[in-house]
Image (cartoon, grey):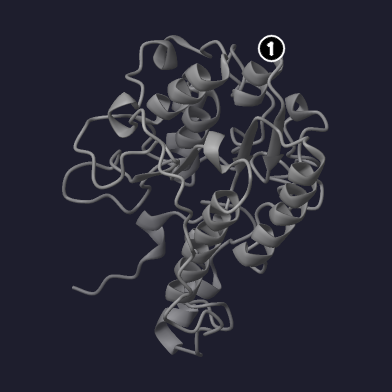
């Protein structure tokens, strides 16, 4: 539903990118607005219906957040970027945006809590996770290579699915995996086209050729947990009925280890290194593609 992350996170978190978000992300992404705070979870960018955790609270559905709008570094002078509405429903030990931190370590922290919750019968009904290594650090010397970042991100996702599918809660679980947008990775069809993966005993498996949107995911979660829609958009979205069957397949998943070295770092490449050395990696999507690439005619 979103062309870029500013709108995309709001669609994925709250089923709506309001007028303020839609008006402010173009100048922010065009390097004409230094105060880009719409991913902080407070201020004018918050939709009237709030976010998924607000809908969960209203429906008495237990919720736990891992990294989304929580514990990000200050954005453009803001001293805090944790959504106030999250309250204490996030893991304070889970590291949000930090490209120097591995998604594998994020998995380990989530797994620590997951094992504790399962053992004590207190697993939240809804968990929301952010794994940011897929952003990569480009060719910046000394940072992991893009391939290493992507492989790490993929492996962390696989380990999460493995852990849940080998646990006693697997028979009643559903995992939805997607990007908030396809920003600067648009294919030949649309910059709003991205991938969705589902892992569940009731998932049909294979490739499903249906048209869904980001809010279809939210609507499906709401229907499963008895939560009311956050906006007109998720209320009228097509649920993911085509992806699910009525017969459970309880066979668990096993994560596949990366086939490349995920510790490989960028060498001191003169031209590429000079370009990426000036990139602002303190927060997500602070790089402006249109002005960051040197072209030769």
Give me the residue at 61% from left, 38% from top: 128
**Image quadrant containing the N terminus:** top left
**Residue sitting nearer the eye, 166 or 194:** 166
Residue under numbered circle 1:
58
Quarter location, residue 122: top right
**Residue sitting nearer the eye, 57 or 1:** 57
Local crowd at mark 1 within 10 Å, few (<14), some, or many (≥20)? few
Instruction: Tell me if residue 265 comes above or below residue 19 in the rendering.
Output: below
Residue 144 in view of the camera: yes
Residue 138 in view of the camera: no
Q: Secondary structure at mark 1?
A: helix
**Residue sitting nearer the eye, 12 or 269:** 12
Instruction: Tell me if residue 147 comes above or below residue 10 in the rendering.
Output: below
Number of labels in the image equals 1
Quarter location, residue 240: top left
Q: Position of residue 112 (x, y in %)?
A: 76, 55
Indicate left or right for 176 with 284 as reference. left
Instruction: Tell me if residue 142 comes above or below residue 195 in the rendering.
Output: below
Q: Position of residue 233 (x, y in %)?
A: 40, 15
**Residue sitting nearer the eye, 256 or 40:** 256
Give me the residue at 71% from left, 15% from top: 60
Q: Position of residue 256 (x, y in %)?
A: 45, 70
**Image quadrant containing the C terminus:** bottom left
Give me the residue at 52% from left, 19% from top: 222
Give me the residue at 51% from left, 62% from top: 153
Q: Position of residue 56 (x, y in %)?
A: 65, 20
């Amino acid at each position: 539903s979103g062309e870029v992350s500013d709108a995309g996170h709001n669609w994925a978190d709250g089923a709506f990118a309001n007028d303020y978000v839609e008006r402010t992300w173009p100048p922010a992404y065009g390097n004409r607005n230094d105060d880009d705070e719409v991913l902080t979870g407070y201020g004018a960018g918050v939709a009237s219906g709030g976010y998924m955790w607000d809908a969960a609270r209203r429906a008495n559905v237990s919720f736990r957040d891992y990294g989304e709008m929580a514990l990000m570094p200050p954005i453009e002078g803001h001293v805090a970027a944790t959504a106030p509405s999250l309250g204490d429903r996030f893991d304070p030990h889970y590291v949000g945006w930090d490209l120097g931190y591995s998604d594998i370590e994020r998995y380990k922290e989530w797994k620590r809590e997951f094992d504790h919750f399962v053992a004590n019968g207190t697993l939240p009904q809804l968990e929301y996770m952010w794994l940011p290594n897929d952003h990569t650090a480009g060719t910046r010397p000394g940072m992991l290579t893009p391939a290493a970042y992507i492989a790490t991100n993929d492996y962390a996702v696989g380990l999460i699915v493995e852990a849940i599918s080998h646990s006693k809660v697997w028979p009643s679980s559903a995992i939805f995996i997607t990007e908030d947008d396809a920003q600067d990775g648009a294919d030949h069809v649309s910059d709003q086209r991205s991938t969705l993966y589902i892992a569940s005993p009731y998932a049909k498996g294979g490739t499903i050729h249906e048209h869904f949107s980001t809010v279809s995911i939210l609507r499906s979660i709401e229907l499963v947990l008895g939560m009311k829609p956050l906006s007109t958009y998720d209320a009228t979205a097509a649920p993911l009925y085509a992806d699910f069957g009525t017969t459970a397949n309880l066979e668990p998943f096993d994560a596949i280890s990366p086939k490349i070295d995920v510790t490989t770092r960028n060498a001191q490449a003169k031209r590429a290194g000079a370009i990426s050395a000036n990139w602002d990696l303190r927060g997500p999507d602070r790089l402006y593609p249109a002005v960051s690439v040197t072209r030769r005619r």
